[in-house]
Image (spheres, grey):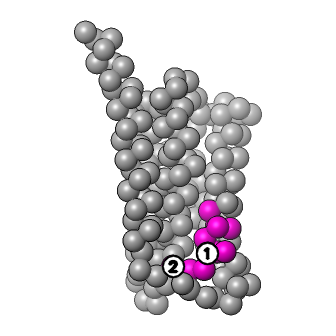
Amino acid sequence: MIGIRQKERVYLSLVYITITAWLTILFFALLPQKVNRVTNVIVFFVTSIVDINKLTLNISTFSLIKPIVTYSHWLALVVYRDITMSIILLIFVNVYFTTQAKRGKWGITILTFFLLLAGSQVLRAYNIIQYTGWTIYYEIICIAALIGITLLTARITTRLDGGKTI
């Protein structure tokens, strides 16, 4: 009986992460104003590449994070890192560049930071990853750097594109 409940809990984490991914995609699709498609595509690719490389270095090279290697946990990690995290950063860029008020820009930046921090802690809580040499402080620094890289990429792309919105 305990083994059955343990398997249900393993697959339940994948369900939660997948539902979160679908909700972020839905929220992005329902945004009333968006920056240009070119900016969205470039920001998505850059954030995905940076985060995938960060995760690969921390898992393979430095062994600071240990993934739990079951099919459902690995799939949940891939769905979160490749879809949910990148879409949250896309939502951040779109709201940031379509908002005129400084308070709104600060608010979306802080909200995005805490959403990404909460997402990384959910991965730990569901035992999808384990920190072996990595700490929450390193995660905070990496999330702040990722938000900065995302903002810089979007700013450069929108300037090259003329600042168009859809």
* Nearer to us in this view, 128 or 107: 128
Horizontal and vertical percent position of residue 106 = 45, 77
- Position of residue 63 relative to residue 152, above or below, is above
| Magenta highlight on residue 42 | yes
> What residue is shown with label 2?
34
Horizontal and vertical percent position of residue 86 = 55, 57
Horizontal and vertical percent position of residue 67 = 56, 29
Horizontal and vertical percent position of residue 112 = 45, 64
Mark 1 element type: helix
Left/right placement of residue 145 relative to residue 7 reads right
CB of mark 2 within 8 Å of CB of mark 1?
Answer: yes
Q: Quadrant of residue 50?
A: bottom right
Mark 2 element type: loop
Q: Disc number at residue 122?
A: none
The amino acid on which the numbered mark 1 sits, given as a three-letter code, is Arg
Please give the name of the residue rendered at 33% of the width and 26% of the height, measured from the top-left corner: 9
Please give the name of the residue rendered at 33% of the width and 18% of the height, measured from the top-left corner: 6
> What residue is shown with label 1?
37
Q: Looking at the image, can residue 113 be seen?
A: no
The amino acid on which the numbered mark 2 sits, given as a three-letter code, is Lys
Q: Looking at the image, can residue 32 be seen?
A: yes
Q: Which region of the structure is painted magenta?
A: 34-44
* Nearer to us in this view, 126 or 136: 126
Q: Quadrant of residue 150?
A: bottom right
Q: For the N terminus, which image quadrant?
A: top left
Left/right placement of residue 46 relative to residue 112 reads right
Please give the name of the residue rendered at 38% of the width and 28% of the height, measured from the top-left corner: 11
